Amino acid sequence: MTKAEINDEIKEAIRACIADKKNPNNCIEKVLTEHDIPLEKKDDILISIIKNNAGPDQP
């Protein structure tokens, strides 16, 4: 799976896991598995989401 294939739907599902779940790690892994994304890519995907959410007033 390439970076371009991590679409907004997947990113929103991961954000929902982080915001709404007591155990976001299991939720994120479930989202990745459902979309056939290797779990080894989880860290890279999370970093990408964080970087894209940082605005001009954030470090």
Image (tube, rainbow, N blue to C red):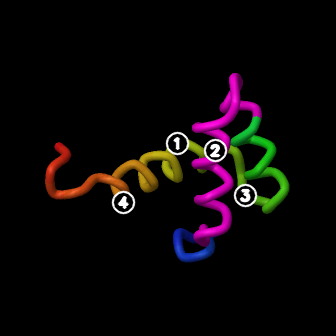
Marks 3 and 1, how far apart in space? 12 Å
Marks 2 and 3, how far apart in space? 8 Å
Between tags 1 and 4, which lies in front?
A: 4
- The residue at which mark 1 appears reads as 43
Q: Is residue 59 left or right of residue 1?
A: left
- The residue at which mark 3 appears reads as 37
Q: Is residue 25 above or below residue 17?
A: above
Which residues make up the magenta segment?
A: 6-26
Q: Residue furthest top?
A: 22
Amino acid carrying label 3: it is Ile
Q: Is residue 6 above or below residue 44?
A: below
Marks 4 and 2, how far apart in space? 20 Å
Along the line of sight, which residue is nearer the eye, 14 or 29?
14
Amino acid carrying label 4: it is Asn
Task: Kindly identify which numbered label has been placed on residue 52.
Answer: 4
Q: Residue at x 74, y 41 (%)?
A: 29
